[in-house]
Image (spheres, grey):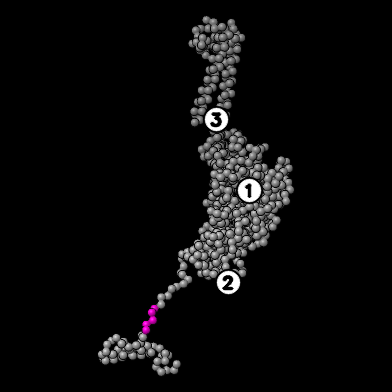
Amino acid sequence: MSGTKILWGQIIIVGLIVLTAIWCATQWAAWRLGFQAQLGAPWFYLVGWPVYPPPAFFWWWFSYDAYARPIFHEGAIIAASGGFISIGVAIFMSVLRARESDNVETYGSARWATTHEVGAAGLLGPDGVVLGRYEHDYLRHDGPEHVLCFAPTRSGKGVGLVIPTLLTWPGSAIVHDIKGENWQLTAGFRARHGRVLLFDPTEAQSSAYNPLLEVRRGEWEVRDVQNIADILVDPEGSLERRNHWEKTSHALLVGAILHVLYAERDKTLAGVANFLSDPARSIEATLAAMMKTPHLGDAGPHPVVASAARELLNKSDNERSGVLSTAMSFLGLYRDPVVAKVTSRCDWRISDIVGGTVPTTLYLVVPPSDINRTKPLVRLMLNQIGRRLTEDLHVKTSSHRLLLMLDEFPALGRLDFFESALAFMAGYGLKAFLIAQSLNQIERAYGPNNSILDNCHVRVSFATNDERTAKRVSDALGTATELRAMKNYAGHRLAPWLGHLMISRQETARPLLTPGEVMQLPSSDEIVMVAGIHPIRARKARYYEDARFTERILAPPQIRHPEASANDWSALEIPEAPDLDASGMPAVVWGADEDPTESEKRRQPELSSKIAVDSRPVIQDEFDADRDAGNDAAILARNINRTMRRIARQADLDPGDGMLGGEP
């Protein structure tokens, strides 16, 4: 709507108010005068009530003022009140018009959210993860969507986001706690309302977890083992395309893990490393044991184990050595006695986290000095948990929501499954709260075209130290339209007054916050961006400033080691080891009835170990004369002569045959 139309609207409204006031004064005076005939004929009747023209009041006042002066004074007051009311309405509409001119949206409509909008978005409720403070309330998000926070080091993300959330979250949680601060401050309170577990691969007394015991025997075993091998051969999360050595070592690890689960007593990753590098036997003997062990009882060796061993045996010695050394490099972490101990048993199962009688909180504590060394194990645990809890949407075995509180999550490297699972894990009751220092840190781990930000419904930003992150936040806040006034003065510079003053307004585009302003946010402020509403300018929460939080800070509990959880492998009967000789070959060759699975008759892409050589028949009397040539003397002499020449030629080719009378 243009300014001209708004001005005409004001004129019409003011005129109607004045006309209405005069008409009311006319009807009031006629009523007080008893609708006498001297007032003239009514304009019309409304429900039996005579209605006079609005200007009639002034005619009556001029003609009959001397007869009823008080009545006309009352009417005059009514008519004058309309003028004052119209003036007030005109001023009010002028203010509205001025505000409308200020709220232009030519270049954009970015602005900060109001209190009503924040409340309507459900961010002022009593439950959910803590995002900050807004006025006198806490900003909380209790929806299934994920949360991402950009917060540099020592910016208050722990005291403002992690600790308040862990002290109020009612469900289960997995906490990536690099320095162990969250365990010290929140484990005591959470232990009163549920079960807490501390997994520290550098501490022998921590809760134990054996990834191999999470493999389900039966139709799922190959898939579970392949998922474990995927993480083992990619310890840094940086393999975009596997080379030959990673592929072949992956196949070897799958077969070795299955063999260890079926046929070895040490069913751990350390046991896999010891099995493949046993100094008491050669690798050929190890592979032969994998091929000959009856993993499946009467059904013979496991086909995946046997094929993996045969595949490696078919390779040359140099290639076999390279594959083995590559596989052993991925298992080097588990030769550490402390790591081997904390992965030797299972104090808890993945199903206990969301399906237990009480909520369970798992703290993954890794000292900064060992974070790179133990990264493969933490990645393996998170990968197993994520895959297991998002397998079947229709099976509702979870009774607790699970919060993935992953502080410094890019330090874990790229988790391909985790990146893709963010798009659908919310439907399984999993909520991720991801914290990174900057956008560069995420792109270094997941690449520039990652989908981490795309799948996070809520984003929290502190004052950042990175220009690219500040630019990304500034673009996300949007662009506002700003009115700029320009003043021009006319007149002589020495004159006591100016000739005239001209003010012009111009609409310009301006970011709601420039990248520089994002980097210069006060230490107490933060920005909360929720999809679907305007951004929120909030303040950081501090748990130590609220007595409700400080009274929940309790000493952490003692670490307990319950009995090992039941699994599919510990009670499995170990099959009898095959009888092998020193070279690793079977001491007794199986007969046709002793090889029910025909594992020795499988067709392999290789040459047979035995090559059949066709023997040529021996020619008898090769150098004798041809007696069948006839009795003719000439023919016989010619044949004898031909035979002697042939013998002489052969003797000449081999002087040492003794036929020419030479020395033997």
Q: Is residue 392 visible?
A: yes
What kind of residue is marked 3? Arg
**Pointer 3 residue:** 97
- Label 2 amino acid? Ala
Image disc number at residue 352: 1
Of residue 225 and residue 578, the one placed in the foreground of this image is: 578
Residue located 70% across and 56% down the image: 205
Check disc 2 and report the residue beneath it.
582
Find numbered disc 3 in the image and state the secondary structure of the residue it sits on.
Answer: helix
- Residue at 60 percent across and 11 percent down: it is 73
User: Quadrant of the rendered structure where residue 502 is?
Assistant: top right
Residue 646 percent coordinates (x, y): 34, 88
Q: Are marks 3 and 1 in contact (CB under 8 Å)?
A: no
Q: Say which residue appears at 40% left-offset and 88% top-offset.
A: 654
Q: Amino acid at mark 1?
A: Asp
Percent position of residue 362, x then y:
65, 50
Q: Which residues are magenta?
A: 616-620
Whether residue 260 can be seen here: no
Residue 161, image quadrant: top right
Q: Earlier in the sequence, mark 2 or mark 1?
A: 1
The residue under the point 58% across, 34% down is: 498
Looking at the rendering, which quadrant does residue 79 occupy?
top right
Q: Is 325 colored magenta in this rendering?
A: no
Label 2 to label 1: alpha-carbon separation: 46 Å
Task: For label 1, count other residues whose C-alpha is less than 10 Å away and answer few (under 14), some (14-19) or many (20+).
Answer: some
Q: Nearer the viewer, mark 3 or mark 1?
A: 1
Between circles 2 and 1, the one closer to the viewer is 2
Viewer-proximal residue, 452 or 5? 452
Looking at the rendered structure, the secondary structure element under dot 2 is: loop
User: Mark 3 or 2, which is nearer the eye?
Assistant: 2
